[in-house]
Image (cartoon, helix red, strand yellow):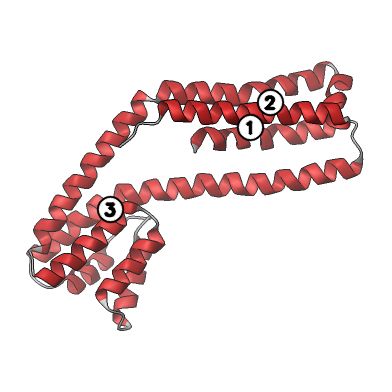
Amino acid sequence: MLPTTLFLLFGVALAPIILLRSKSSIHVKRLLASGLADRVVRAILMVRSERRRRLICLELPSMCDLLASILKGGGGFRTALQVLHQGYRGPALKASIANLNETLRLGTPQDEALRRWASQLGVQEANFLAFCVNVSQRTGGRLAEVLERLSESLRAQQAVALKAEALTSQGRLQALLMAAMPFLLLLVLSFIDQAFLSFFIGSINGIGLLGLVVLLELVGLMWIRRIIRIEA
């Protein structure tokens, strides 16, 4: 996802400069600008969604540890969840924990409330937590020990993911350079020879060549992403 996002960000950052320096008609500029605005919004949403997902995954092990500590002190899961909500300070999960408490207070069954909570978070680790809690409550197991083991497992997964990210950093850097190079070259050419740029913006052949460049860029990014991907 990261190379494609960078590709979009470089495009939307440099395209306004290119549009202003081009001799295309006002209608073409408006059409391109509207399309770029849509791409900007999508790129920003992708970045924010990925950042939110990472924060949630980082906070879930700590949430499991806190719940386990509260459960060891006595009380059930709902009581532990209420105590957790009062003292929790994590920015990614604080609001969702409050919503989960409110849902349980309104009388929603615990297993259904946890499934909804995990679905709203949108990460697989939250589904693991909901599944472990529901199964432990049904079978009468020691939920505190289950949560501690889940926390250890999640931290181990995160350590493996960080190691994989470090091993693939060179490939991601190559993808970044490859995504940036055509746009930087087009920006330089727009200052050197504006007539050369007008060919790409204002003619069918130029637009076709630009489309081919974008297509080859996307193919190259997808290929690099496939090379650096580490299968679980």
Residue at horizontal 17%, vertical 46%? 152
- Residue type at mark 3? Leu
The answer to whether residue 34 is above or below residue 93 is above
For image coordinates 12% across by 59% down, the residue present is 69
Above or below 22: residue 73: below
Q: What is the C-alpha distance between the residues marked 2 and 3? A: 39 Å
C-beta proximity under 8 Å, tags 2 and 1 = yes
Q: Is residue 29 visible?
A: yes
Q: Which residue is mark 2?
A: 183
Q: In what element is the residue under mark 1?
A: helix
Q: Quadrant location of residue 206?
A: top right
Q: Secondary structure at mark 2?
A: helix
N-term mark: 1 or 3: 1
Circle nearer the N terminus (2, 1):
1
Left or right, residue 129 beside residue 124: left
In the image: residue 5, left or right of residue 53: right
* Amino acid type of the residue tagged 2 in the rendering: Phe
The residue that disc 3 covers is 60
Residue 186: percent from left, percent from top = 74, 22
Secondary structure of the residue carrying numbered label 3: helix
The residue shown at (64%, 26%) is: 216
Q: Position of residue 61 (x, y in %)?
A: 23, 50
Would you say 223 lies left or right of 228 here?
Answer: right
| In the image: residue 5, left or right of residue 183 | left
Q: Residues within 10 Å of mark 2 (few under 14, many from 20)?
A: some
Foreground pick, 128 / 92: 128
- Residue flagged by tag 1: what amino acid is it? Phe
* Residue at 14% across, 64% down: 70
Residue 95 % position (x, y): 38, 64
Dot 2 or dot 3, earlier in sequence: 3
**Are the residues at dot 1 and dot 3 in contact (C-beta closer than 8 Å)?**
no
Q: Label 1: which residue?
A: 10
